[in-house]
Amino acid sequence: MYREYQAPVAVRPVVACLWEQEPNGDHVQRVVPDGCVDLIWLAGRELVVAGPDTRFRDAALAAGAMSSGVRLRPGVAGMVLGVPACDVRDLQIDVDLLWGGRAARNPGDSMAEIRGRLAEAAPARRLELLSDVVTGRATERPDPLVGAAVRHLAHPGARVAAVAAELGVGERQLHRRMLGAVGYGPKMFARVARLRRLMMLTRRPPALPSVSAGQPARWSVEQQAAGSPAPVSCSSSLASFSLASVAVAAGYASQSHMNDEVRRLTGTTAVRFLEDAIVTAA
């Protein structure tokens, strides 16, 4: 079972969602690129950072082993991690290798103390503790230029040269700043954003609840483009969609282009991927 929750108000500018996963049985989970970086208490024993993926990967999950995570919004990872986000691209790495045993930038709790609290905490408290770690590290303002680029590149038909010109910088500078903040350059991010648009065009998303099971937040394509949380799961039939028209609406040149891109990023066919896909917050 995979669940997502709204982030606390204080961290919503940098956190897309909080999440939990507790498999009912042993299985392998296909993870596809979403432009995000996650801080994860993995299977109740490891605290790791999962960097931004550029292609699919498979994660082996053991039955009953609960993992809890905080998903950072695209463009804030470099600021929170304290290292260029590209340093953790396509990696899952222990936080001690990044932070030297300290949870916060300033003197504070050690990672050993944080791990002890996570191991003893109830599920909801684990998510609060992980959010506190992010709060302690988010001491600077995210790069506003990267934030604007992320929003621009999320639109169908966005071109890197045009986005750079709109923001008043050269393509090289935009590439460099996105490498540090997102983990990869604008062209790769645009490909990932297009894949997410494709998923959202073929899904009917439910609401995203708060951790305390309060009022759920409704979601829309416009909200997601503006950086609001995306939905938890999906349920719809591809039979009601024309893949050719959906491909063009998502920003692909053609259905063939979509098929090639989906296979490269997800390792499977577009039809199979869309039938199984779950739209997650990003």
Image (spheres, grey):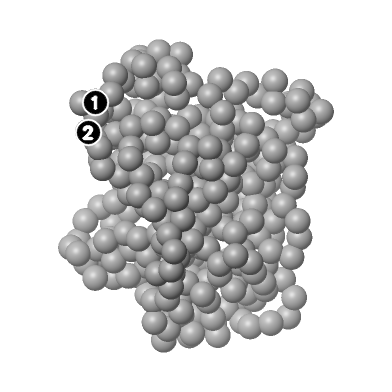
Q: Quadrant of residue 111?
A: bottom right
Please tell me which residue is depicted at 62% across the width and 74% down the height of the picture. Answer: 103
How far separated are the C-alphas under marks 1 and 2?
6 Å
Taking the image as drawn, is residue 136 in sight? Answer: yes
Q: Position of residue 174 (x, y in %)?
A: 73, 33
Q: Position of residue 229 (x, y in %)?
A: 50, 51
196 sits to left or right of 72: left
**Disc 2: which residue:** 237
Q: Position of residue 158 (x, y in %)?
A: 60, 23
Please tell me which residue is depicted at 41% across the width and 86% down the height of the picture. Answer: 120
Q: Nearer the viewer, residue 154 or 51?
A: 154
Please tell me which residue is depicted at 48% across the width and 29% down the height of the picture. Answer: 194
Residue lying at the far right in this picture: please name it: 168
Taking the image as drawn, is residue 37 in sight? Answer: no
The amino acid type of the residue labelled 1 equals Ser
The amino acid type of the residue labelled 2 equals Ser
Residue lying at the far left in this picture: please name it: 25
Asked if disc 1 and disc 2 are in contact, CB closer than 8 Å, the reply is yes
- Mark 2: give few (<14), some (14-19) or many (20+) Cα within 10 Å: few
In the rendered image, the vertical position of residue 281 relative to residue 131, given as above or below: above
Q: Which mark is residue 60?
A: none
**Disc 1: which residue:** 240
145 sits to left or right of 52: right
